[in-house]
Image (spheres, rainbow, N blue to C red):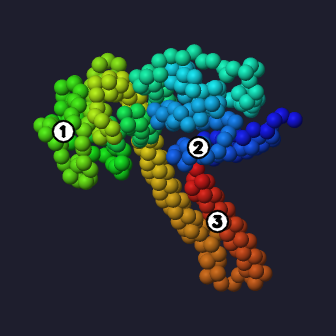
């Protein structure tokens, strides 16, 4: 029987919880779960584990930092990463801090083999990794690379903006970020989302604000004292009660070099924004501009399609109403004709004339009355058949 091991898994994903409970416990492992926060780090400090598994669910800089914090606490405990991100840049991002990297999607067999190879290495020495630069810029480049891949798969505009803003604030360790889109037709700037703000659309002329200055000039702005900057618009802070301490704003250009908007990040939590931050945010803005244009085009096509469908539905409904009303009018008129047929039937006139004559034998009158009753029944049957036929025509039209 394999030796039992204590494994701690860092994840907020409930599906991962259930997956490991069902898989690893059958392999004689003791499974523990932890959140990627201070409580998880305390758990590492107070207990000893044979393996640490960390799921990276987003290409965030904070995910890399958390791995580094884990490694600094328990440098001798092997770490296994589960992620669809950083697979191609894992050596640059993690260096020798990680013993194994399992890319998503993975099979159960591949995962178990990776876990067993880490817990039971073939040689006493840990697997050696090729170590590249582990500096801040190399990690940011890895984040940028993963971000560019993930953004192109998002087609919902609001989701795209939220994703971009989360990535930017995380990478630059800042409080808020906003994407401003340039409306060339109205010469306005608009934004639909901002970190820490409710989802809403704001618009203002291109002549107002630092974002307007950046879009107009095509140059970035970094300021540690925005309230003294001539282009800074204080209205947003006054309205929201937020205090902007420092900011960086860079232009966004598409593949043709045309300005499509501005990318603004506020309040760096530590120190101030630097030229290195500007380089990174400008690179991020380039990928963002392409993704935003593609998503806006997709959204515009969806709106046009929905508009065409709406117009078609309205025309179809109007056509059906016109046809139905015309049909009902014709049917009503035909029913009137059916009701009036009796007065044009010569048999009934003949009968009335015969009754007015004298000296008609009784047996002959009885015979005529029988004929009259037969004729009435026949007329009623014909009228009923015609009415039923008209009803069927109306019902069939209503079901079309």
Sequence-first tag of 1 and 3: 1
Determine whether 306 is above or below 346 in the image: above
Q: At x 67% / y 22%, what residue is drawn?
A: 126
Q: Secondary structure at mark 3?
A: helix
Report how far apart the C-alphas of labels 1 and 3 lie in the structure. Answer: 93 Å
Q: Name the foreground residue: 240 vs 33.
A: 33
Characterize the local packing of mark 2: few (<14), some (14-19) or many (20 or more) Cα atoms within 10 angstroms: few
Q: At x 37% / y 27%, what residue is drawn?
A: 284
Whether residues under marks 1 and 3 lie with C-beta atoms below 8 angstroms apart, the answer is no
Report how far apart the C-alphas of labels 2 and 3 lie in the structure. Answer: 95 Å
> In the drawing, what numbered circle is on residue 45?
2
Sequence-first tag of 2 and 1: 2
Point out the frontmost of discs 2 and 1. 2
For disc 1, the marked residue is 225
| x then y, percent, for residue 137 | 40, 23
> In the drawing, what numbered circle is on residue 210?
none
Q: Secondary structure at mark 2?
A: helix
Q: Name the foreground residue: 101 vs 189.
A: 101
Q: Secondary structure at mark 1?
A: loop
* Left or right of residue 290: residue 184: left
| x then y, percent, for residue 252 | 30, 27
Report how far apart the C-alphas of labels 2 and 1 lie in the structure. Answer: 41 Å
For disc 3, the marked residue is 383
């Amino acid at each position: 029987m394999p030796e039992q091991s204590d494994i701690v898994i860092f994840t907020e994903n409930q599906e991962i919880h259930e997956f490991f409970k069902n898989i690893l416990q059958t392999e004689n492992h003791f499974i523990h779960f932890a959140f990627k926060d201070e409580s998880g780090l305390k758990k590492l400090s107070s207990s000893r584990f044979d393996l640490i598994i960390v799921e990276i669910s987003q290409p965030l800089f904070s995910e890399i930092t958390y791995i580094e914090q884990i490694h600094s606490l328990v440098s001798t405990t092997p770490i296994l990463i589960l992620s669809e991100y950083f697979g191609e840049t894992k050596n640059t991002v993690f260096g020798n801090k990680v013993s194994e990297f399992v890319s998503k999607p993975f099979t159960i067999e591949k995962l178990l083999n990776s876990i067993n190879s880490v817990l039971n290495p073939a040689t006493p020495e840990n697997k050696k990794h090729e170590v590249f630069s582990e500096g801040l810029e190399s990690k940011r480049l890895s984040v940028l690379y993963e971000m560019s891949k993930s953004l192109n798969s998002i087609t919902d505009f609001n989701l795209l903006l939220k994703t971009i803003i989360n990535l930017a604030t995380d990478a630059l360790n800042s409080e808020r970020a906003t994407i401003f889109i340039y409306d060339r037709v109205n010469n306005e700037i608009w934004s639909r989302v901002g970190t820490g703000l409710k989802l809403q659309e704001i618009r203002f002329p291109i002549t107002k604000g630092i974002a307007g200055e950046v879009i107009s000039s095509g140059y970035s702005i970094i300021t540690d004292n925005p309230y003294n900057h001539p282009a800074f618009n204080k209205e947003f802070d006054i309205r929201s009660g937020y205090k902007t301490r420092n900011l960086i704003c860079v232009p966004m250009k598409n593949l043709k070099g045309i300005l499509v908007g501005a990318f603004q990040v506020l309040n760096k939590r530590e120190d101030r924004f630097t030229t290195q931050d500007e380089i990174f945010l400008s690179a991020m803005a380039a990928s963002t501009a392409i993704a935003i244009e593609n998503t806006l085009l997709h959204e515009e096509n969806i709106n046009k399609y929905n508009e065409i469908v709406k117009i078609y539905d309205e025309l179809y409904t109007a056509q059906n109403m016109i046809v139905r009303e015309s049909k009902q009018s014709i049917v009503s008129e035909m029913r009137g004709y059916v009701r009036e047929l009796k007065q044009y039937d010569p048999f009934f006139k003949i009968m009335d004339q015969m009754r007015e004559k004298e000296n008609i034998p009784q047996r002959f009158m009885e015979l005529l009355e029988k004929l009259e009753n037969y004729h009435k029944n026949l007329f009623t049957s014909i009228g009923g058949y015609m009415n039923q036929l008209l009803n069927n025509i109306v019902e069939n039209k209503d079901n079309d």
